[in-house]
Image: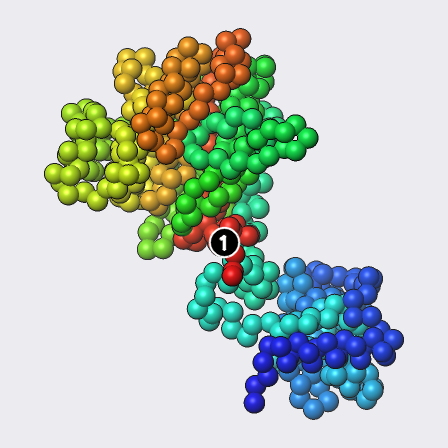
Amino acid sequence: MAKTLEEIRKTRLEKLRALNQAGFSGYPSETKRTHQVGEAIEGFKELATLKKEIVLAGRIKSLRTHGKLTFIDIEDGSGKIQGLLRENNLGEKGYQFFLDHFDVGDFAELKGTLFETKTKEKTIDALDFKMLAKSLRSLPEKWHGLQDVEERYRKRYLDLVMNSGVKEVFRKKSQITKLLREYLDKQGFVEVKTPTLQPIYGGATAKPFITHHNALDINLYLRVSDELYLKRLIVGGFEKVYEICTDFRNEGIDRWHNPEFTMLEFYQAYANYKDLMKMTEQMLSEIVKKITGSLVVKYGEMKIDFKPPWKRLPYLEAFKTMAGIDLEEYSTFESLKKFTIKKKLAVDFKTAADFPTLVDHLYKDLIRPKIINPTFLIDHPYSMRPLAKRKAKSLDKVESLHLIAGEIELVNAYSELNDPQDQKTRWQEEMARAKKGATEYQVLDEDYIEALEYGMPPTAGWGMGIDRFCALLTDQHSIKDTIFFPTMRPKQ
């Protein structure tokens, strides 16, 4: 009869007590490891030929006993190798001690020499062993077979232990972040850090999280963006700055949204959104090639070609050709609302309560799902980008871009509005939207307006969610799979 999980835990606790009573710690502070598993495998030929004694350490992933022989798989952060424990090497008491005290999941140290079995399996022939950390709970036998996918996120440590593919996703995310940083550093950008706690949240149209500072007795907001602080640095004389940070937005949770996420933002003086498009093509295509080995990325059933140049598609043209909506004709909320009702388009007017939110809703339903290869949606309506500079010859539009690939929004960028009077008017319009029922809007930041009044040169700003970019390059279909510990509803 199979043991329950609690019975297994009690048995392992008994083994731990027996280990301690025999004079050994279940959690010693020292190991004499000489090689990582990966190093041992890489130098296998030389080490095996010389019969050099080495010490490996790692978690026991499997354990198979055949009389006086026991085979284990031992894994550390660099790889996995087979271990062989034999009564002939360890003596009858030593061999039995291993069988009595060690389980799958334990961290162990093996001292021995390397050899290759008849089946060409690289193996360490153990001459001695040591417990490094006793595992009191049994590892899942078939972690991938679990039906409750949320458990993978709640217990990410087990997901990582049982699924090497998950580790690879996060290794690639680390590599992507490193490559982004290297590219910007080579371009002369300075990496900076700006406040996470802000007296006024800004830089994005999103709901904030509120916290309280006891000593100052004031409410503060967790940043929704670092944009306004980075642009203050441009005012201060820096010409190229960037930050890789965690942003917090008090919004719904779905495939592409988590309340906290990793964002890269950079700002460059004496540049505009056209410069950003060229830079984006160069930077991201280079990273795609280095991470995947190709400029064509397989994402689900799609094949996404990142070879530059990428398509530039004006926002209003996209609505005409892909959604059959002329936003110049339906340029007010009421006219566009009547059109959507007439066409029986599925719209929740409680959330899409004004023109910008209704347009954004239609874009997400009718346009974004049709864009596979990297495409810059450019020149958004003025009311949709409160921080972007108007186009000189078309004041109802702004110099903006949205990069879409594989139906995913990757980048939001624009020529920055540096006219303090225009910026203040735009924010006042945002506050008016709020009074009319908009649930997400930007707020007036008088201190930032004051900074602009000292003068900010023409500037281009760029932002990308690193979690989404990683998901695209690793064929993951939710950013939960690229965030170690995504936000989850607590278990009751």
Which x, y percent locates residue 471? 45, 49
Taking depth in this image into account, of 369 and 128 the one nearest to the observer is: 369
Which residue lies most toward the top here? 454
Residue 57: quarter of image: bottom right
Taking depth in this image into account, of 217 and 484 the one nearest to the observer is: 217
Q: Is residue 425 above or below residue 256?
A: above
Residue occupied by mark 1 = 488
Q: Is residue 388 visible?
A: no
At 31% from the left and 23% from the top, the residue drawn is 383
Q: Is residue 354 above or below residue 118?
A: above
Which x, y percent locates residue 449? 49, 14
Amino acid type at mark 1 = Met
At mark 1, the secondary structure is loop
Taking depth in this image into account, of 134 and 241 the one nearest to the observer is: 134
Which quadrant of the figure contains the N terminus?
bottom right
Is residue 191 rendered to the left or right of residue 478?
right
At 63% from the left and 33% from the top, the residue drawn is 213
